[in-house]
Image (cartoon, rainbow, N blue to C red):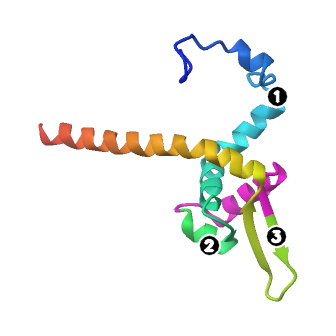
C-alpha cells in the first residue's frame, strides 16, 4: 500500500509513533475516529458544515436517521467537542447545533472522501446498468 502523496510504501508503524497507538484497541484516538466515521457521525458533521441547524432541521435533512440515533450521535459528537449545542432559554425551547473549530477541521477532511464515494458510487451504478443492458 502506498500513501496518496508519495510512491513510498505505507508503514503502519508511523501511525503508532506519530499518531499515537491508533491500531491499539485502547487508544483514545481510535474511539474518536470511530465516532467521526460512524454511519451517522459523518452525515451529521456534513449537514452541520452547511451552517448551524436546529434538531428538527437535521432530522428532516438526514435521510433515514431516527430521532434516537440523531440524539445519540449529537450527544457523542458534542462530548468529542466537534459539535456545539446552543440551548437558548426561551419557551418553547430553542436549540441550535453547530460545528466547533475542531468539527470544522475534521469535516473539511471528510468532504473529499464523500466526494470520492459519490463519484465512485455513480460510476458503479452506471457500470451495473451498462452490464445489465448488454445481457
Distance from disc 1 to disc 3, alpha carbons, whole Å, reads 30 Å
Q: Pick out the residue farthest to the right.
A: 89
**Chain-order first, disc 1 or disc 3:** 1
Q: Quadrant of the C terminus?
A: top left
Q: Residues within 10 Å of mark 3 (few under 14, many from 20)?
A: few
Q: Pick out the residue farthest to the left.
A: 134
* Residue in the image at 71% along x and 37% along y: 33
Q: Mark 3 or mark 2, which is nearer to you?
A: 3
> Where are the magenta residues, as a range?
63-84
On whether residue 76 falls in the magenta region, the answer is yes
**In the figure, 94 relative to 74: above or below?**
below
**Whole-percent x and y of residue 3?**
56, 20
Q: Tell me the SS state at disc 3.
A: strand
**In the figure, 68 relative to 22: above or below?**
below
* Residue in the image at 80% along x and 56% along y: 78
Residue receiving disc 1:
27
Quadrant of residue 85 within the rendered picture? bottom right
Residue 57 - label: 2
Quadrant of residue 21 within the rendered picture? top right
Q: Pick out the residue farthest to the front.
A: 5
Q: Tell me the SS state at disc 1.
A: loop
Left or right: where does residue 92 sit relative to residue 89? left
Residue receiving disc 3:
86
**Chain-order first, disc 3 or disc 2:** 2
**Whole-percent x and y of residue 35?**
72, 44
Left or right: where does residue 29 sit relative to residue 59? right
Q: Tell me the SS state at disc 2.
A: helix
Distance from disc 3 to disc 2, alpha carbons, whole Å, reads 15 Å
Q: Residues within 10 Å of mark 2 (few under 14, many from 20)?
A: few
On whether residue 35 falls in the magenta region, the answer is no
Instruction: For the residues labelled 1 and 3, say whether their Cβ atoms are less than 8 Å apart.
Output: no
Distance from disc 2 to disc 1, alpha carbons, whole Å, reads 34 Å
Amino acid at each position: 500500500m502506498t500513501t496518496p502523496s508519495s510512491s513510498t510504501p505505507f508503514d503502519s508503524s508511523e501511525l503508532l509513533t506519530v499518531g499515537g497507538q491508533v491500531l491499539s484497541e485502547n487508544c483514545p484516538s481510535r474511539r474518536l475516529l470511530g465516532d467521526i466515521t460512524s454511519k451517522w457521525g459523518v452525515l451529521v458533521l456534513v449537514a452541520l458544515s452547511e451552517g448551524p441547524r436546529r434538531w428538527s432541521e437535521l432530522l428532516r435533512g438526514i435521510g433515514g436517521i431516527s430521532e434516537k440515533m440523531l440524539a445519540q450521535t449529537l450527544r457523542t459528537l458534542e462530548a468529542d467537542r466537534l459539535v456545539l449545542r446552543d440551548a437558548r432559554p426561551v419557551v418553547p425551547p430553542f436549540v441550535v447545533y453547530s460545528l466547533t473549530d475542531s468539527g470544522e477541521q475534521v469535516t473539511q477532511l471528510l468532504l473529499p472522501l464523500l466526494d470520492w464515494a459519490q463519484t465512485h458510487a455513480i460510476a458503479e451504478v452506471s457500470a451495473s446498468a451498462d452490464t445489465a443492458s448488454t445481457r
